Amino acid sequence: MRGTRTEQRRPADRSRRGGIPDVAVILDPNHVYQRRILRGIAEHVHRAGGWRLFIESGGAEMVPDPRTWRGDGVIAYFGDPQIARLVESLRTPAVSIERGLDDIPRRVPVVATDNEAIGRLGAEHFLDQGFSHLAYCGSAEPVYWCGPRGAAFQAAAAAAGASCSLFTRRQKVSRDWPTTLQDLADWIIGLPNPMGIMAANDTRARHVLEACRLAGRRVPDEVAVLGVDNDEMMCELATPPLSSINHAAREIGRRAAELLDEMMQGHRPTGTFLVSPSGVTARASTDIRAITDAEVATAVEFLRANFTRPLRVDDVAQASGLSLSTLKSRFKSVIGRPVHAELQRLRIDEARRLLATTDIPVKKVALLCGFTDVSHFTTAFRRDAGMPPGQYRSQAAT
């Protein structure tokens, strides 16, 4: 995260309300991403002893009237100039979720998704599967987060020596759906096979899936497709089910609430605090490896089918039909890592999925992922994720 803290100001006088702060949370609970952020805010509120909250669903009622509301703080997505006017008129401590407007008051810190990290993660997901041809499909409408995701995706592809095509055309999807699909299909037809396409978000990824069908490209056999947001309902409604990058939305909410508490106590944090995505939820749309070496492909498939049980590299060599030394050499040349490292990656990826989507105890997660010792699992997971399993579960929960 980036950001700074400067001088303190005098805390607000809340004695008339028994020390409980009045806070307006201007986020829409009907919006999936913002609902997840709200959960993170709620966790901090309960841990910190409670706030008196103003929160309404959708429309003009979301923003309190400054003539009657005299609160102590605001957490908001500054997508409406009315919110900026409210904060400026009351001089109320405030934290912005994301950066919806260019003219957010300078004194307001921003807690935001790290869009460059999302782009890199998308590229890494395909590169780890052996793809050498990647593509990025930008948003149909101009949005501030689309460009950084695409630029980081393209840079990561270039750094790995992979080709990268970009689709950046603006489209009126609801106005002319057939033309939207045909434009995307024409682009996809011109791409090499096999191809990994990351879309700017889940909505755009579903457009790509439909365009692949129109173009006669099989998903995931010829084109693997990855979205962003992990809107579970929309991802499962896609055909095939859509793989997607997870925002750490709950962590964004927690961090925003912590910053606002600091501000209401007299601190003045400034700048932008970035929160990295929590990983990829893999579904059928990327369930393939782009490997032309048949024996190495067999070895990889064997690993994917058996990583949850005790395995030796000898077992993988036998399954591939190669000698141990030949497998080690060719596997590292094609995949970019040794056999044991790929086995560890598969196990950690499954652990990430189980921690983020289930309540299975950490010890059992370790066993289900092929680790016979929970201490070894914890050490390996911390090395990969930068945090212990319990903390990862807390941050990744939605």
Image (spheres, rainbow, N blue to C red):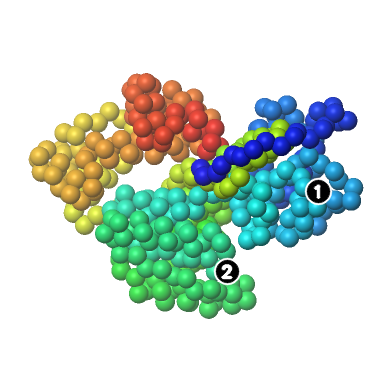
Q: Residue 90 carries which label?
A: 1
Q: Which label sits in the foreground, 2 or 1?
A: 1
Q: Quadrant of residue 40?
A: top right
Three-letter amino acid code of the residue under disc 1: Leu
How crowded pointer 2 is (Cα within 10 Å; few <14, some 14-19, many 20+) is rated as: few
Q: Can you name the residue that lies furthest to the front here?
A: 7
| Residue 33 image point, x, y percent | 61, 49
- Residue contact at pointers 2 and 1, CB within 8 angstroms: no
Compared to residue 169, the image places residue 233 above or below, namely: above
2 or 1: tag closer to the N-terminus:
1
| Residue 84 image point, x, y percent | 73, 55
Identify the secondary structure beneath mark 1: helix
How crowded pointer 1 is (Cα within 10 Å; few <14, some 14-19, many 20+) is rated as: some
Q: Residue 141 carries which label?
A: 2
Q: Nearer the viewer, residue 243 or 218?
A: 243
Q: Is residue 179 left or right of residue 254?
A: left
Q: Nearer the viewer, residue 32 or 92?
A: 92
Gap in Å between the C-alphas at discs 2 and 1? 34 Å
| Residue 219 image point, x, y percent | 39, 61
Identify the secondary structure beneath mark 2: loop
Residue 256 appears in the rendering:
yes
Three-letter amino acid code of the residue under disc 2: Glu
Compared to residue 217, the image places residue 97 above or below, namely: above
Residue 206 appears in the rendering:
no
| Residue 112 image point, x, y percent | 57, 49
